[in-house]
Image (cartoon, helix red, strand yellow):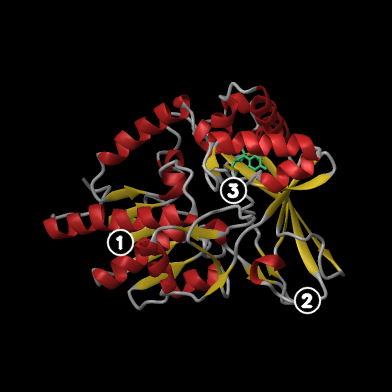
Amino acid sequence: MNISKNIIVGAGLTGTTLAYKIATELDEKVLVIDKRPHIAGNCYDEFDSEGLYLKKYGPHIFHTNDKKVWDFLSQFTNWHPFFLKTEAFIDGNLVNIPFNFDSIEKCFPKTLATRLEEKLLEKYEYNSRISISQLLEQDDKDLKFLANYIYENVFKNYTEKQWGIKAEKVDKSVLTRVPILISRDKRYFQDRYQAIPQYGYTAMIEKMLDHPNIELILNTKFDKKTHKAERLIFTGCIDEFFDYKYGKLPYRSLAFKFQKFDKEFCKDTSIVNYPNEYDFTRITEFKHFLDLKSEKTIIATEYPQHYEPGKNEPYYPIANKENHDLLAKYQTEAKNIDGLIIAGRLGEYKYYNIDAAVARALELFDKEVLNEFFKEKNNFGYSCR
Ligand code: UDP
């Protein structure tokens, strides 16, 4: 039987980061397989026949404070500096998200807005970031009013559409991703490094895979019987790896409606959220990301939906106790299989941003792959034991 040295399942950022590290630092052969016809996982992007930038799986904006990740990825791409500005359609106004002092002034009459800003500044430092749950805990009558307004108009309905459950049931860490800004900062993220790869994520990842030790096979579903390796790195859904033997882990998915228009722009900003109206959550206009000039434009309207294996793609793990208990069963089983690493947003069932996924892949390389390598264990394949 043919046993590869390394097989990596999934050519997304986690898989390709690990492939690059193994190929270059260990000088070992790596076979990367992906069931889709393209690399880059959900970060995949392309330019259509008229040169318009398009992301089939929705927007991804790279942002990080982690210089190690920034430097690592900078080996494979130049960057187009990009600071995401997002607006939400609230009560007929386009309001900055994260909700900030400008948003307050858009939503409320001047005297009320001034009073709310003064009260916020009594409680919090200028330029700080607070979470909606922090604001909801305030006793002051005005701040309570503001907190309820933001919760009801920005978070509640968007969250219920996005996750398909009551907003109170969604893990607090999810809503904390989008802060309230005690300032006029208009940026969605406050990280030091924010950018889009100049020629797209796919081109960046293609460069990571461009190494004589790396072989890439697309359109190929992982099959335990045929894909044997001394080291197997699996970046798909962990429950799928174990054939759902303890039950299905729920993931959230998305559907997109793409439209092309014969006009230069549809929107002033790349992303507009629709928390309250309609059954979609947001509209993305891709050309803003790379500042591309064209007489035409493409937008994507985003509809959250359940993930159904084989029918759509998994995007988000759903954090709650029941799911984490089920995850723990799969993780215990994975730990007992020599040479197996299950990694990435789907494999680890963690809501990683791009930078966190790369940081984690670099950490796994140091902690799991290098350690194992130096132990020089006599390993004959993860499933042969
Ligand atoms: N969210 C919201 N209203 C918004 C934007 C975000 O309620 O206008 C909530 C929603 O629950 C969402 C979460 O904040 O799932 C995280 O938002 P983020 O923009 O980080 O989501 P992603 O881009 O990862 O889909």
Name the front one of labels 2 and 1. Answer: 2
Task: Tell me the quarter of the picture where residue 57 sits.
Answer: bottom right
Q: Position of residue 245 (x, y in %)?
A: 42, 32
Cα distance between the residues tagged 2 and 1: 44 Å
Position of residue 182 in the picture relative to residue 148 (left or right) = left
Looking at the image, which residue is at 40% across and 39% down? Answer: 242
Is residue 278 visible from the viewing direction of this image? Answer: no
Q: Which residue is mark 3?
A: 313
Q: Where 32 sits versus 78, above or below?
A: above
**60 relative to 107 in the view: left or right:** left
Q: Nearer the viewer, residue 164 or 186?
A: 186
**To which residue does mark 1 refer?**
6
Can you name the residue that lies furthest to the right here? 262
State the image coordinates of residue 208 (x, y, percent, origin top left).
Answer: 42, 71
Q: Is residue 195 above or below residue 365?
A: below
Q: Quadrant of ligand 1?
A: top right
Residue 37: % across, % down: 57, 64
Count residues near mark 2 (Cα–Cα under 10 Å), then give few for <14, some for 14-19, many for 20+.
Answer: some
Does label 1 point to a residue whose CB lies under 8 Å from ligand 1?
Answer: no
Amino acid type indicated by mark 3 = Glu
Amino acid at circle 2 = Ser
- Cα separation between marks 3 and 1: 25 Å
Residue 347 in percent (x, y) is at 42, 45
Q: CA distance from mark 2 to mark 3?
A: 30 Å
Of marks 3 and 1, the one in the foreground = 3
In front: 309, or 148? 148
Quarter holding the C terminus is top left
Q: Quadrant of the N terminus?
A: bottom left
Choose the circle earlier in sequence order: 2 or 3. 2
- The residue to which callout 2 is attached is 294
Residue type pointed to by label 1: Asn
